[in-house]
Image (cartoon, helix red, strand yellow):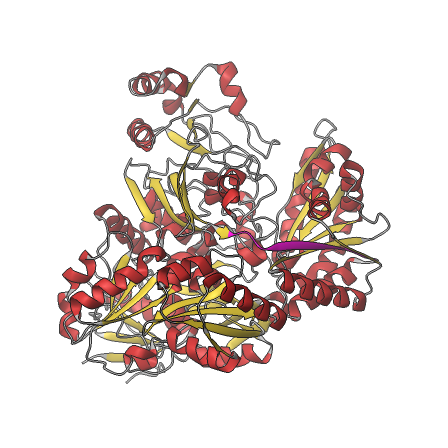
Amino acid sequence: MQMPAPDQAAISALPALLAELESFLPAGAIVAERRSVKAFETDGLSAYRQEPLCAVLPRTTGEVARILKVCDRLGIKVVPRGAGTGLSGGALPLADGVLLVMSRFNRVLDIDLPNRCAVVQPGVTNLGITRAVEGQGFYYAPDPSSQIACTIGGNVAENSGGVHCLKYGLTTNNILGVELVLMSGDVIRLGGRHMDAAGLDLMGVVCGSEGLLGVITEVTVRLLPKPETARAVLLGFLSSEAAGDCVARVIAAGIIPGGMEMMDKPALNATEDFVQAGYPRDAEALLIVELDGPGAEVDHLIGAVSEIADACGATYRRISTSEAERQLFWAGRKAAFPAAGRISPDYLCMDGTIPRKRLPEVLSRMQDLSRKHDLRVANVFHAGDGNLHPLILYDANEGDQLARAEAFGADILRLCVEVGGVLTGEHGVGVEKRDLMPVMFDEVDLNQQQRLKCAFDPTQRLNPGKVFPTLHRCAELGRLHVHRGALPFPDLPRF
Amino acid sequence: MTETLHARDERDVTETVAWALAGNHPLELRGRGSKAGLGHAVAAGHVLDLSRLSGISSYEPEELVLTAQACTPMAEIEALLVQRGQALAFEPPDFGPLLGTGGGTLAGALSCNLAGPRRFKAGAARDHFLGFRGVSGRGEAFKAGGKVVKNVTGYDLCKLVAGSYGTLVALTEVTVKVLPAPESQRTLRLRGVDAQAAMVAAANSAHEVSGLALADGVTAIRVEGPEPSVAYRLRALTDLLGGEPEVLDDAASRQFWREIRDVAAFSRFHDRALWRLSVPPAGGCALAARLAAETGGRSLVDWGGGLVWLEMPDGAPRADIVRGAFSEGHAMLFRAGAEARAGTPVFQPEAPAIAALSQRVRRQFDPQGLFNPGRMGG
């Protein structure tokens, strides 16, 4: 993975930048000393590291606007960062760029239960929102595995998902408004406490834009009343085909579970070693199906799912009988990444989505790829929505294993696209999948996406080098090729 | 005299746009014309009729996705989904009777970001729009999104296209998320209660209501799902809200919410101006009452207060009164005569920085402003 060559002029502008920043930011808000800057050199994709030019930690929207204005004027790039838990390298610093760290925006500003929403600063953690409202019986639905640490601002930038998003949606379906600072320093407010946009849905495209369009300084999130109850079923199968068939039949029966997760044998054994959730070690595939909602409905659906599982040849079934037991079922799944970390010095977590019916074929071809690249792989899978998380196990200190892991990962994602899926279901493109974008999109598709950035950030100083494999100047993207002057199809019906 | 060009496939669309681009011929993009009266009148000498781009390309119930040519009639899609017990969860309204037109298309529902009574729970068209192919105002065919239910690869251009009223791209093929249709439903109808308080209490309860409307002074609350769950929640809501509600059975409930969805109450007098207000839900009932009193009009509240329909007593929009009555949200002049629409911003005027940004975004898709010029104002 290569980043664009650093701009020496920007690097030499550092003293001028610091002088300007010091004029309006308090002392602790600027981190420029090399030793301290090093703490910010990576995000959740730790295979890649780069020290930023400096890190800046503002507290107010006004400060963010001034920082962006100064950087824009001095020609210095800016990389926004929340908690740095992203798994695709979206917050990987640039050698010639300021790292804009939003962690000090950590206040819940307003909780409005009659309107079922909360206004929060972007550095509030995902779980922090739920913690602020759970006493009153509410919660914030998207729940990425990193929810204890990841911030809502980062969630908006990445359009994060979680295990419950088949039923409750991703971040984009659960936010109502954002405040955004453009690279020009302009502050705009999109959406609010109402449900849809007055004009173009700019908030919709800002969500998931991976820090390339603007810096989010405030978010209005939807709150949901906590379901009356939730119960989970653990199901063991002798093959991933049988487990996949069970998932398809549950959905065909009209049931959308709160969560429906699959793990293959290596993943379930690694997590079982780590948290002892009581998973059946002899199963080839494990399903966790969670039903939530009114008690009567959950009991009814648990019965329906159990019958379907029996018909699909489940060899193991355990239904949670208490909240503690339900939490235990999830403890293993939610610890799947650290569990992989225990059985391997390093791992790469992939994130493709496939049409679910292609799962057996994809898993089998993944085993072929595992042999080809001579690296182990464990699979966790948001089974309901077809989102795969293969964990490629490697040791960065062993020869060319990192390069092999990257190549293995790229092969898996190519496979996902080949069977009709996509490169990323919830982690974002970042730098990790940037160079694979042409596998899914042709040049016209990518150019049209990049033009959108020109409307928000015409000088392309905000997080460049992420998402798109080739940087184009906006002037070049804007060029029109007009080549036809007459209606070229005489047979076109017209009247 | 407007000339209509009928495209048969994406290639026709591409070539037509290339021609329009070369000669600077603005185009009115049209499916079946059911919503041609929404927004401002379009200043274009040619209509690009896309209605022949019709037909369902693939439907995989177990994958929860459906791909169709853009202008497939909504009725055809709904008829297919119902056979497999599925539906578009955003309950797309049929505004034909309201606007004096006919049935619409899938691309039309997406382009206008339609949403029915389930909006506050299940989202709008935008939330179910997974991917598309289309032709930009640059005359280039391109695609965005994907054909799976979960995807964050690249910018989410579907969100931008939803609600863009055909000003960004001529859609040729779209992929949407489909979901199981609720097995059964019933509706509680309450009289003589504080409607807003009842709606907030129901929406904030754990009973998963999926419809909250106030029509003719009656508060209506819908529950959907498996029968045992519906019965259980209906009891719980009755206990919670008190009073002696009337209960609509499954068939009556479906009929009732279809009428709410399509705003049937206001489909009789097409010469009366009609507003659609999207506001924070907790203030919706009060706003509706105040505006009805002030204008002599009639109101209908949906989405637990988040959506207010206001029918004027005549053809005058009274925009100052309507837009002056709230501070958060927006009001769209949904139906009005040509003269009224020409004299009133149909869409709520936006803050200058947002309007400017929106215009820059439009120009990145349609640099010469060929598609539906003027439709969204500006």
Q: Is residue A119 above or below residue A241?
A: above
**Residue B205 percent coordinates (x, y):** 50, 57
Predominant secondary structure in magenta?
Answer: strand
User: In the visual, does B76 lie left or right of B101?
Assistant: right
- State the residue at coordinates (69%, 39%): A335
Q: Is residue A337 above or below residue A250?
A: above
* Magenta segment: A225-237
Q: Residue furthest right?
A: A282
Q: Residue furthest front?
A: B243
Residue A366 inside the magenta-drawn segment: no
Q: Is residue B328 above or below residue B136?
A: above
**Residue B227 percent coordinates (x, y):** 61, 73
Q: Nearer the viewer, residue B17 or A375?
A: A375
Rendered-image quadrant of the C terminus of chain A:
bottom left
Let me know if residue B140 appears in the view.
no
- State the residue at coordinates (67%, 49%): A412
